[in-house]
Amino acid sequence: MVSAGLFSIGIYVVLSKQNAIQVLIGIEMMLNAAILNMVAFGKFDKINNAGQTFALFAIVLAAASTAVALAIVLNVYRRHQTIDPGKINQLKD
Amino acid sequence: MFYVMAAIALGSALYVAASGNLVRSVFMFFITLFALAGLYVLSLADFVAVTQVVVYVGGILVLILFAFMLSGRENLEGLKQQKNRLLSVSKLPAVLLAAAFFVVLTNIFLKAKADDISWIKQAITEQNVMTPQNTSINSLGVNLMTNYLLPFEAISVLLLMALVGAAHLSRKEESAT
């Protein structure tokens, strides 16, 4: 239930913000909602720890993707002087 | 305790969604992450909670703060003029989609009835449920090095690649090209 709420808020943030960093925060929020679900059901798996292990993997993946996305955001800002994803409308140089 | 943590997490997440100020939303996201770590502890996953605090709070948020502090002051000035009303016409699709997702997910949650899913029943009858008495770190470490060794190595290589790529992307343009 908490996870569903967090996921919805994350989607709202992703779709409504005019700022790439806040979109990134929304994506992180959705990832966290998924991880929360995995951890909550990982309680019923004491021997294999599948839920918690994959929660750890998901956290690491989120960290990697955030690092790359921030680098891209910095580059885009340097080139276009804006980080509004609605204003960036060209893909090539 | 669970409800307090859940309320803190959802409330601060809503504040992140509602506030137009970037700095404030980053710091409220901080609080969301801490509350989520508390929820992990309450579902008996203490190691995941510690990793959450270290990786997210220590790593990602500092990275985000650095990114927009490096990107200049005029950037912050421009961001403050953003209109920040939660419900406005331009955000109507976002609100609709978020509400639809919420309805679907709660519907699934209410219909699934987590107590009579077959594998959970089986786990309960086989005493495969974690209790607060035993810590999970020991078995988690053993499993990470035996059953899940291949994903572990793959993810470490991927993390290395991603970090090298990020460092390469954020170099100065002249030297990169």
Image: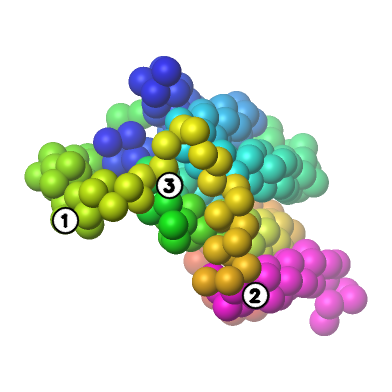
Secondary structure under badge 2?
helix
Q: Which residues lie in the magenta part?
A: B148-177
- Identify the subunit bearing mark 1: B
Distance from the alpha carbon under mark 2 to that under mark 1:
32 Å
- Identify the subunit bearing mark 3: A
> Nearer the viewer's eye, disc 3 or disc 1?
1
Residue at x-position 58% and y-position 71%: B146
The three-letter amino acid code for the residue at tag 2 is Glu
Residue at x-position 38% and y-position 53%: A45
- Identify the subunit bearing mark 2: B
Secondary structure under badge 1?
helix
Looking at the magenta stretch, what is its main secondary structure? helix
Instruction: Work out which residue is located at the far left of the displayed protein and give it.
Output: B111
As drawn, is B157 to the left or to the right of A29? right
B171 drawn magenta: yes
- Residue with the mark numbered 3: A39
Instruction: Work out which residue is located at the far front of the displayed protein and give it.
Output: B126
The three-letter amino acid code for the residue at tag 3 is Val
- Residue B172 drawn above or below residue B25: below
Q: Nearer the viewer, residue A2 or A85?
A: A2
- Residue with the mark numbered 2: B153
Q: Nearer the viewer, residue B124 or B85?
A: B124
Tell me where residue B130 appears, x and y as whole percent. 41, 42
Instruction: Work out which residue is located at the far bottom of the displayed protein and give it.
Output: B177
Tell me where residue A21 appears, x and y as whole percent. 58, 47
